[in-house]
Amino acid sequence: MKTITPAAEVRRHILETGQAIMSGKGFSAVGLTEILTAAGVPKGSFYYYFKSKDAFGEALLEQYFADYMAEITVLLEKPGQSGAERLIAYWEKWLGTQAGCDHQGKCLAVKLGAEVADLSEAMRNALRIGTARIMQRLAKAIDEARADGSLVVEGDALFLAETLYQLWIGASLLEKITRNGEPLKTAMVATRRILNLSLPK
C-alpha cells in the first residue's frame, strides 16, 4: 500500500480547493491568495508544492483526469451489466452531473479548456493527454460491448469514441449557455442513435 505523506495530503488539499473554486470562476479570475486562504495554507508555502500558478494549473488538470479515469473505470467495469449498459450509464452520469447551474462536479475540461489552452502550453498538453485517455477508455468499452454482443455498430471503436466524446463536450458547452438540460438530452438521443441502441419509451 502506498504511504501518503503529510506533504502529499496538503498538496492534494490545495488542488481540491483550487478545483472547487476554479470550476465556478475559471483559471484567470482566481488568484493564489484566494485558493490558499480557502485551503487554510500559508501563502509562502505555495511554492514548496508548485513552481508557479501555471504549474499548479497543470497539476490540477492532471489530478482531475486521474480522478476522472478512476471514476469512469468503476462505471465501465461494473459487474452484472452488459457493455452497452455500462456505456449508457457513463453518459447518464455525464448528463446528471453537467446539467443545471451548480458548478460543483462540472467537467473541468469544458470549464478550462478554451481558456487555458491559449495561456499555457503545459496546461494545454495536460488537457490533450487527459482527454485522449478518456477517449481511448471509451473505445475499449465499445470493443467490450461488441464482444459481449450488446452493441452492434460498424466503424472503428476509437473513431466512435472520439465522435461521442466531442459531441458531449460540445453539448456541455451549450449547456453552460442554455442551462436547461436540452443540449445534453439531445446528446443522449444522438449517442443512442450512433450506437444503434433503442431509445427509452
Image (tube, grey):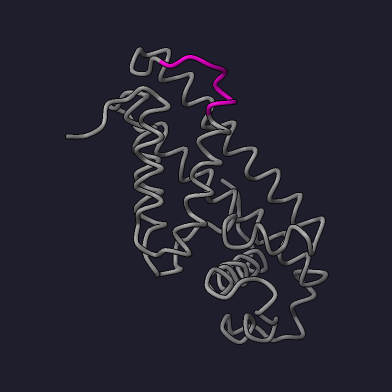
Q: Nearer the viewer, residue 72 or 50?
A: 72
Magenta stretch, residue numbers: 153-160
- Expressed as whole percent of the image width and height from the top left, the position of residue 199 reads 26, 31
For this view, does 34 lie left or right of residue 104?
right
- Expressed as whole percent of the image width and height from the top left, the position of residue 171 reads 47, 50
> Which residue is pictured at 46% across the width and 46% down the height?
71
> Which residue is pictured at 41% across the width and 43% down the height?
187
- Expressed as whole percent of the image width and height from the top left, the position of residue 96 reads 34, 53
Q: Is residue 95 above or below residue 141?
A: below
Q: Is residue 159 above or below residue 36?
A: above
> Which residue is pictured at 72% across the width and 62% down the height?
116
Q: Nearer the viewer, residue 147 or 156?
A: 156
- Answer whether residue 159 is magenta in the image: yes
For this view, does 54 lie left or right of residue 83?
right
Quadrant in the rendering for residue 55: bottom right
- Expressed as whole percent of the image width and height from the top left, the position of residue 59 reads 70, 60
Quadrant in the rendering for residue 191: top left
Q: Is residue 142 above or below residue 182?
A: above
For the N terminus, the quadrant is top right
